[in-house]
């Protein structure tokens, strides 16, 4: 039952990720343009260059803000990561089964037969 729940959650996260791939690419491009334009604006020597690089940086900011729903895609990536880790996690053995006298008897009997 646990695997079924993980499968459902992983499927929903995969669908959300696929739906937000476009905005994620747009967000990445907008942030890259904004970062590059800001660095050039700070390094520019004349007022005209600072103005144009600053204007390009503001355009990059607007593109980034327009693609804010891409954060849902980032959350979906994290959820997929957690589902993957939980799926591959070894199930813990109950302490009850370790202390079960019948299980211990079978182990001891197998040891005695092999000796």
Image (spheres, rainbow, N blue to C red):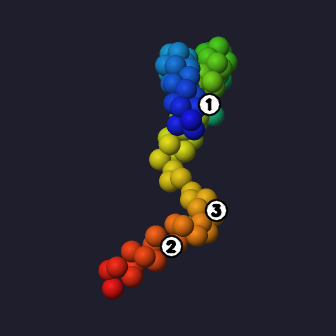
The foreground one among 91 and 41 is 91
The foreground one among 84 and 97 is 97
Are circles 2 and 1 on residues that touch, CB within 8 Å? no
Mark with earlier residue (2, 1)? 1
**Circle 3: is it few (<14), some (14-19), or many (20+) Cα within 10 Å?**
few
**Circle 1: is it few (<14), some (14-19), or many (20+) Cα within 10 Å?**
some
Q: Position of residue 99 (x, y in %)?
A: 61, 69
Label 2, secondary structure: give it: helix
**Which residue corresponds to mark 3?**
96
Quarter that holds the C terminus: bottom left
User: What's the distance in space between the residues labelled 2 and 3, CA to CA?
Assistant: 14 Å
Label 1, secondary structure: give it: helix
**Labelled disc at residue 105:** 2
The foreground one among 58 and 90 is 90
Q: Position of residue 104 (x, y in %)?
A: 52, 72
Q: Position of residue 13 (x, y in %)?
A: 56, 26
Label 3, secondary structure: give it: helix
Are circles 1 and 3 on residues that touch, CB within 8 Å? no
| Above or below: residue 50 compared with residue 111 | above
What residue appears at the point 57 percent right and 57 percent down from the top-left corner?
92
**Which residue corresponds to mark 1?**
75
Mark with earlier residue (2, 3)? 3
Are circles 2 and 3 on residues that touch, CB within 8 Å? no
Camera sees residue 53: no
User: What's the distance in space between the residues labelled 1 and 3, CA to CA?
Assistant: 37 Å
**Mark 2 or 3: the one toward you:** 2
Q: Quadrant of residue 24?
A: top right
User: What's the distance in space between the residues labelled 2 and 1, CA to CA?
Assistant: 49 Å
């Amino acid at each position: 039952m646990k695997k079924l729940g993980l499968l459902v959650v992983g499927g929903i996260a995969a669908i959300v990720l696929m739906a937000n791939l476009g905005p994620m690419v747009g967000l990445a491009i907008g942030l890259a343009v904004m970062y590059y334009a800001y660095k050039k604006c700070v390094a520019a020597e004349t007022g005209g260059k600072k103005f144009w690089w600053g204007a390009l940086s503001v355009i990059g900011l607007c593109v980034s803000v327009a693609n804010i729903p891409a954060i849902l895609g980032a959350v979906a990536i994290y959820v997929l990561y957690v589902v993957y880790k939980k799926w591959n996690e070894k199930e813990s053995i109950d302490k009850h089964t370790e202390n079960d006298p019948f299980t211990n008897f079978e182990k001891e009997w197998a040891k005695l037969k092999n000796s």
